[in-house]
Amino acid sequence: MVSQTKTLRFFFCLFVGTASITLNAPLFAQNFRSAWMWKAPTHPYGTANVIGDLAKEAEMISYFGAWGFDRIYASLGDTPLTDPTSIARWNAALDDVGMDSQKLHGIVIPNPTSLANLVQTQLIDFNVSRADPRERFDAVHLDIEPHASAAWQGGTPAERRDLLFDLRDTYVAARSQLDNNGAGEVKIYADLPVWYDSSSSIGWLDTADRDQWFADIGVPLDGITLMAFERDTLSSITSGVGWEVANFNGEVRVGLNANEVGPGDTFADFDAMLAMADAIELFYGSAIGGIDFQPLATFTDLAPTPVLTADFDEDSDIDGADFLAWQRGYGISSGATLAQGDANGNGSVNVSDLLVWQQQLSAPAIAGAAAVPEPNSWALVIVGLVCLLSRSKHHQNATKIPLAS
Ligand SMILES: [Ca+2]
Ligand SMILES: [Ca+2]
Ligand SMILES: [Ca+2]
């Protein structure tokens, strides 16, 4: 009992000490990357296998940090109805590390009424029921592909243009549904192929007609991701996305296809795809919002598994000394080392690194590790810390996403 009391007093002092560190954390230092996280029930990192499993959720979010993700597009279906507790936890955990949670909808035929109903029942009802804003979705992410429909493939150019106006009206319906039902703060992002502006297969009346359509979708949408698929040079990608980057009124990101990696394919290997992502970001700078990978499942198969370690002092255990190293380093936004508390190797020290420490403390995996004291007490400290640190998050979000002009 004596040792337990002393231990608790020690943690209490730690907690009080933490309150004195700055609450204005610097910007989350990273590239701006993301991926489409589909249900993928046969893949360990499909939402079907991650959401609802606390340990896998935390592992996934630590990996997001290591890969430089600033948001995730997750296909969750009606899980906000069937398992709201897990969705709330997932959204809050992403929020705590400065990531946006975007609810992904993959649809072929644009339909304003059915999308408005989906957004109402699967997102708005959930969001308005959560008192804690950390638990809410930040955005709807729409992957609507009329060009994949039979109507498009068998249609005339004029009929394809009509389908794109249905698409525009579907975006507008989602925006109205959010605005009119207490969810006006929720953003909308959409995926587009790179060629809607340039293909003669679409019966635009003239360039003004095309320009007006893009201007129209810029009203309901906050941003678009242009799917630059089957293009293996920087110049072929910039020729596909350049018009939209210059003209779309909102954020533009570029999507790369992780399914096009291998000998003889678009990218010879994973490193070649990442090098292209770097080249695109270097070329456009802040004129684009970032690079997205489709899909997350394949991306994770290709990417080296990030090394996550919370043994910051490298003495082969995970304990309070490592926590203190993290606490001293907390807030470093770039160039952080392991010794400073960067558990996921992304150069910054934040709650994501604390989650790694928490996981490894409660499940010590290092050979010869000493007995770990009082994980429940540590959990209390973490709960308090996460509450404190999350207060600064919305300040970060307000400034972190560059907009195309
Ligand atoms: Ca284009
Ligand atoms: Ca250690
Ligand atoms: Ca880190």
Image (tube, helix red, strand yellow):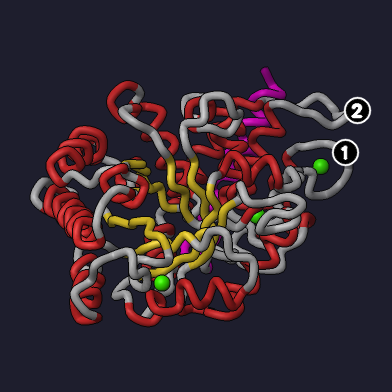
Q: Are marks 1 and 2 in contact (CB under 8 Å)?
A: yes
The x and y percentages for residue 214 are 25, 71
User: Crowding at label 1, few (<14), some or many (≥20) Cα neighbours within 10 Å?
Assistant: some
Q: Can you identify the residue that label 2 sits on?
A: 368
Rendered residue at 47%/72% (across/down) = 240
Bounds of the magenta segment: 1-26
Name the residue located 18 percent from the left edge and 51 percent from the top edge.
170
User: Measured along the vertical axis of the image, is residue 278 above or below residue 96?
Assistant: below
Q: Vertical placement of 252 versus 286: above or below?
A: above
Ligand 2 has an atom within 8 Å of the beta carbon of the residue at disc 1: yes
Outermost residue toward the left in this view: 180
Q: Nearer the viewer, residue 124 or 219?
A: 219
Please state which of residues 288 and 114 is positioned toward the viewer in this rendering: 114
- Residue 24 in the magenta stretch? The answer is yes
Q: Which numbered marker is on residue 316?
A: 1
The percent coordinates of residue 93 (x first, y second) are 47, 42
